[in-house]
Amino acid sequence: MAERKPRKKATQKSAKSTTPTDKASARFTDEERGAMKERAQELKAAARRGPRADKADGESDVLAKIAEMKEPDRSMAKRLHAIIKASAPALAPKTWYGMPAYAKEGKVVCFFQSAQKFKTRYATFGFSDAANLDEGALWPVAFALKELTATEEARIGALVKKAVS
C-alpha cells in the first residue's frame, strides 16, 4: 500500500492591485475634492443655523461666493442672481458645492458654475432634476455661458419661471 503524504494547506496569495496607490487623486480632481469639502461645510453651517434659517442667510452666502469670483464670471453671476430673483422670487438662494444655487422647498432647482471652479473655458448655468423643464424625451439641463446679452437674459428668465412652475 502506498504511503500517503499529508496535504499541505493551500496558501492564498493576494492579487496585486492594479489601482494607483493614491486612489483619491485618481478618482477626483483637486477642484472636485474642493467642491466636496465646500459642500460638507455648507451642510455643517446649515445644521448650526437650524430649521429657522431664513433666505437672508442663504443670500449673504451666495453674494459672498459671487464676490470671490473673477471677471467675467462675477458680472454674469450678479446679473443671473438678479434675473432669478425677479423671475422666481419663491426660490431661496443658497450655496451648493461652493456655487450659487437657488432652491425650492430645500431642493436645488438651478445653479451657476463659474469657469474657474473646474478650470473650464466657459461658465455653466444648470438645472437639477427638481426643475420642471421636461419636454418629451430630451431637454437641455445645462447651458454654457460666455456672456449675457439681453437675448440670453430673457431666455434664462423664461426657463427659471418654467422650472419653478
Image (spheres, rainbow, N blue to C red):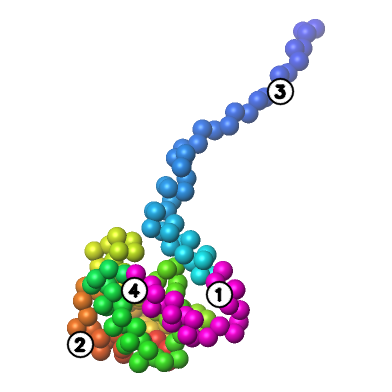
Residue 154 counted in the magenta span: no
147 and 8: which is toward the camera: 147
Q: CA distance from mark 1 to mark 2?
A: 35 Å
Q: Which residues are magenta?
A: 44-68
Question: How many residues crowd around disc 2 within 10 Å: few (fewer than 14), some, or many (20 or more)?
Answer: few
Question: How many residues crowd around disc 4 within 10 Å: few (fewer than 14), some, or many (20 or more)?
Answer: some
Question: How many residues crowd around disc 1 within 10 Å: few (fewer than 14), some, or many (20 or more)?
Answer: some
**Residue on which disc 4 sits:** 67
> For residue 64, which quarter of the picture?
bottom left
Decide which of tag 4 and tag 2 comes sooner along the chain. Answer: 4
At 42% from the left and 68% from the top, the residue drawn is: 98
Decide which of tag 3 and tag 2 comes sooner along the chain. Answer: 3
Q: Quadrant of the C terminus?
A: bottom left
Amino acid at dot 2: Ala
Is residue 126 in sight in this rendering?
yes
Decide which of tag 1 and tag 2 comes sooner along the chain. Answer: 1
Q: Position of residue 103 (x, y in %)?
A: 46, 82
Q: CA distance from mark 4 to mark 1?
A: 21 Å
Q: CA distance from mark 4 to mark 2?
A: 23 Å
Helix, strand or loop under label 4: helix
Q: Position of residue 136 (x, y in %)?
A: 36, 82
39 and 58: which is toward the camera: 58
**Residue on which disc 1 sits:** 46
**Residue on which disc 3 sits:** 9
At 40% from the left and 86% from the top, the residue drawn is: 163
**Residue on which disc 2 sits:** 150
Helix, strand or loop under label 2: helix
Amino acid at dot 3: Lys
At 63% from the left and 28% from the top, the residue drawn is: 12
